[in-house]
Every structure is written in C-alpha cells, then in structure tokens.
Amino acid sequence: MTDPSNSRYLARVEDVWEYPRPPRLEPVDAEVEVWFAGERIAYTVDALRILETSHPPTIYLPPAAFASGVLVPSGGMTTRCEWKGSAAYLDVVAGGRLAPRAAWSYAHPKREYAALAGHVAVYPGRMQRCRIDGLEVTAQEGDFYGGWVTPNIHGKLKGGPGTRGW
C-alpha cells in the first residue's frame, strides 16, 4: 500500500468548481482499494475518474479489480446520465453481507466515455472503506451521488441538502 504522504494523486489540490461540464474522464494515478464486510473486495492501479463541476471525483474500477463473486446484478434498476448514458446497478456481496445497489456500471456508454464500458463505481458510503493511495475516502453527501472526497478536494460540493437542483 502506498504511503499517502508520498502520493502524487493527493498532492494536487483541486477545486470542484474548476472541473468541467460536460464531465472529463481521465486515468487515476494512484492505488485504489475498496473494503466491505472485513474483506478487501477490489484493488487496482488502473482506475478511471470522472470530474464534473461541483462534484468530487467518481472513481471507476476495471471489473478485474474486484474479487470473484462480489458484484451481482441488482435486477433491472437503471438510471440515465445525460453525459454517459444508461447505468445498471449491482449489489455488493462479501463476508455474508449484502449492500444492495451499492455499485453501478455503464455497459454501453456514450462515445465520449467509451473507456468507461464495464468499469464499476461504488458508493463509498455503502462500503466499509475506500482508499486512494492509502488515504481513507469520505463519501460525497447525499444518497444519489458516489463521489470520493479526499483532503485535496476543495469547494462546495453538490449532494447535501438544498443542492440537488444545482
């Protein structure tokens, strides 16, 4: 595991109000880990992130980053993003526990976001813990958004009370 004090990812101070609209997709230059029910269920150095105005980054992991059997289709629930397309939801199962609809993926994203195809994002607030370069992530406020908040992320974040219509 990386020492967060040496992290190139966390060394960049970022203001969410300087993130673009439409969102930008870019690689994550960091180790990414996800823990649930006492188990590390995902690890990668090949994650992607979406940066969108007023949101902390949303992290997407390649399917191979997840332990076998921890991602289970949620049975038809979908949402639509004006930028990325239709997302299908996944349950996360590990250690005898279930986190319903705690992850999502775009099987066929719009052309501009084609690299996201099959990658999986998790809601950090529904996991035991998520880490970027060894540093604990805080979940974006609200029950709809899945942003990963780290100390280098600044600016008023969408997700809390009164921000849904921004």
Image (cartoon, grey):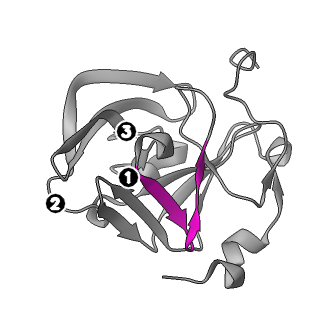
**Residue 87: percent from left, percent from top:** 39, 32
What distance separates the C-alpha of mark 3 from that of mark 1? 8 Å
Q: Examine the rendered structure and indicate whether residue 46 appears above or below residue 120.
A: below
Q: Nearer the viewer, mark 3 or mark 1?
A: 3
What distance separates the C-alpha of mark 1 from that of mark 2? 15 Å
Question: Around disc 2, counting alpha carbons within 10 Å, would you say few (fewer than 14), some (14 to 19), or many (20 or more)?
Answer: few
Identified at 70% across, 25% down, the residue is 160
Question: Around disc 1, counting alpha carbons within 10 Å, would you say few (fewer than 14), some (14 to 19), or many (20 or more)?
Answer: some
Q: Main secondary structure of the magenta part?
A: strand
Q: Horizontally, is 75 left or right of 79 in the view?
A: left
Q: Nearer the viewer, mark 1 or mark 2?
A: 2
What distance separates the C-alpha of mark 2 from that of mark 3? 16 Å
* Mark nearer the N terminus (1 vs 2): 2
* Residue type highlighted by circle 1: His
**Residue 95: percent from left, percent from top:** 19, 53
Q: Nearer the viewer, residue 61 or 143?
A: 143
Pointer 1 residue: 119
Q: Horizontally, is 155 left or right of 51 in the view?
A: right
Identified at 63% across, 33% down, the residue is 141
Q: Is residue 101 part of the magenta span, yes or no?
A: no
User: For numbered disc 2, what is the local secondary structure?
Assistant: loop
Q: Which mark is residue 104?
A: 3
Which residues are the magenta region?
A: 128-139
